[in-house]
Image (cartoon, grey):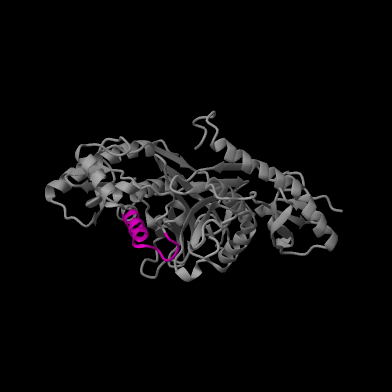
């Protein structure tokens, strides 16, 4: 097996440095910032609030609506044109599906909970960072949840399974690598986000899903710490 | 907004009091942070109290417009993210976002802050285009002033990426080359509420404003752009007072901007 040296000198299962912060947007009902390496996501929750047009309402429960958006200067390369794209719409949809299993909106029929995810800078793994931030923002909003979803990518580059691919790794060997974003509910060990592009064998795939779990649990801890420290009076002036 | 709240704000202002305890011409605590985004050629975060705005500069090599074959392209855009305030919605740009971008754009363009001729590489063929995007993270009023300050701070810290032989750009190789700035346009919006004038309105205060005037200044004596807004008219005396307040406020901003590198 070829030994891969990661451009960032990380170990194979090591994720990039993480910053997590809750309650960063005063106007929102709940908010968070999640940064992993040079990929950074803000998430804001508004609601439950009235849902228009009315035919979208669900009389049994509130509707979760996610919106993933890259800021114009957040792309690796040239400017990203503002407004929804096919890519951003699909990511918004998988984000919704990743979060739905942990959130209970049965107390809020006919309403919507809007989750806005905006990224000021990206270096691969942006949907995962968005889901991490969104989970924290929903919890910060005080909504009924059974857990927070932790998400990170695992992949195969030059024959090695590696955790949390950065942009340099994704583009290695003319994008020959395999990229698998995974979202996990840590308490139940359920997977709520799973996508892949690239090629991988059955054994390697099963192996990859197991290899990424320690990193996901580490992210879950960071998310919890951030929410707890928001209500911690001690380190005053710490929040930016 | 409910009428009682609006009336309360107006009555307090009449007595010289603001809801957050500031004086009429006080700006919230201003902080400017720059160069923290890895994907932008220039970036700035401006906070007025808890209100927060980001500005990012992206550079690209493009073909110039046919009527200005020797000029680089300058563009200012504002995205009023629904993330930043419950009143913003997804969809096509609102009139507020268009006005914000155009007023900031005017300040930079009309003052010739950037000599667009110097952004030309091959006449009629390739020029640098410069996009300044203004994005509120937490919208709490006064976006034009905050965005204008963030935009100019981002420009001040912008570094050109490497231009390759084939005319494309390697964004992963920033150079030391900065954009030459001839001046620093600072927009200050002065608002008239009843008979009093305030600067740096919060989101709530903005809803009680009768008229506003954005005055963009370059130094202690030069105005380079104006925009009147709001439903009420302004008298000449009002305008005189508003201009004075704008110059005073802009000086404070310019002092803070001088520390940005």
Q: Is residue A38 left or right of residue B196?
A: right
Residue nearer the viewer, B132 or A235: A235
Task: Give the x, y percent position of residue A236.
Answer: 50, 30
Task: Give the x, y percent position of residue A157.
Answer: 76, 56
| Magenta-colored stretch includes residue B105 | yes
Q: For residue B250, which quarter of the picture?
A: top left
Residue most toward the top? Answer: A234
Task: Give the x, y percent position of residue B224.
Answer: 26, 51
Q: Is residue B95 visible?
A: yes
Q: For residue B22, which quarter of the picture?
A: top left
Q: Is residue B222 left or right of residue A56?
A: left
Magenta-highlighted residues = B89-106
Residue most toward the right? Answer: A1
Name the main secondary structure of what is drawn in magenta.
helix
Task: Report the residue at 23% width, 45% height from top.
Answer: B10
Figure check: B162 above or below B252: below
Residue nearer the viewer, B43 or A218: A218
Q: Is residue B174 visible?
A: no
């Amino acid at each position: 097996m070829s030994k891969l040296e990661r451009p960032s000198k990380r170990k194979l299962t090591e994720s990039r440095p993480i910053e997590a912060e809750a309650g960063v947007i005063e106007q929102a009902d709940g908010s968070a910032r999640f940064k992993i390496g040079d990929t950074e996501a803000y998430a804001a929750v508004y609601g439950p609030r009235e849902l228009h047009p009315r035919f979208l309402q669900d009389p049994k429960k509130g509707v979760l609506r996610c919106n993933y958006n890259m800021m114009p200067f957040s792309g690796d390369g040239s400017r990203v044109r503002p407004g929804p794209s096919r890519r951003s719409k699909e990511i918004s949809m998988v984000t919704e599906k990743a979060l739905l299993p942990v959130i209970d909106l049965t107390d809020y029929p006919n309403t919507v909970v809007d989750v806005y995810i905006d990224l000021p800078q990206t270096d691969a793994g942006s949907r995962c960072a968005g889901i991490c931030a969104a989970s924290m923002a929903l919890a910060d909003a005080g909504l009924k949840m059974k857990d927070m979803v932790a998400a990170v990518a695992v992949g195969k580059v030059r024959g090695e399974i590696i955790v949390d691919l950065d942009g340099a790794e994704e583009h290695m060997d003319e994008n020959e690598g395999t990229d698998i974003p995974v979202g996990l509910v840590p308490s139940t060990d359920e997977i709520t986000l799973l996508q892949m592009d690239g090629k991988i064998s059955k054994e390697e795939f099963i192996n990859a899903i197991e290899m990424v779990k320690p990193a996901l649990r580490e992210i879950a801890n960071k998310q919890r710490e951030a929410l707890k420290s928001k209500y911690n009076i001690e380190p005053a002036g710490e929040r930016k | 907004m409910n009428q009682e709240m609006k009336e309360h704000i107006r009555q307090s202002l009449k007595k010289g009091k603001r809801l957050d305890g500031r004086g009429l011409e006080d700006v919230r605590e201003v902080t400017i942070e720059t160069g923290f985004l890895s994907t932008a050629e220039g970036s700035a975060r401006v906070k007025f109290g808890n209100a927060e705005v980001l500005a990012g500069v992206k550079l690209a090599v493009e073909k110039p417009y046919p009527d200005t074959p020797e000029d680089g392209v300058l563009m200012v855009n504002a995205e009023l993210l629904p993330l930043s305030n419950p009143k913003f919605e997804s969809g096509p740009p609102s009139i507020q976002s268009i006005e914000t971008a155009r007023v900031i754009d005017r300040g930079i363009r009309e003052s010739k802050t950037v000599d667009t001729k110097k952004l030309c590489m091959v006449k009629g063929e390739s020029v640098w285009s410069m996009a300044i995007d203004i994005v509120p993270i937490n919208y709490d009023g006064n976006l034009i002033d905050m965005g204008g300050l963030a935009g100019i701070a981002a420009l001040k810290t912008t570094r050109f990426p490497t231009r390759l032989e084939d005319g494309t750009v390697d964004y992963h190789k920033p150079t030391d080359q900065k954009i030459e700035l001839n001046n620093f346009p600072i927009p200050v919006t002065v608002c008239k509420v009843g008979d009093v004038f305030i600067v740096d309105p919060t989101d709530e205060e903005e809803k009680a404003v009768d008229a506003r005037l954005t005055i963009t200044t370059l130094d202690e004596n030069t105005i380079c752009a104006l925009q009147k807004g709001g439903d009420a008219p302004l008298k000449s005396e009002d305008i005189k007072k508003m201009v004075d307040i704008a110059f005073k406020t802009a000086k404070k901003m310019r002092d803070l901007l001088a520390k940005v590198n």
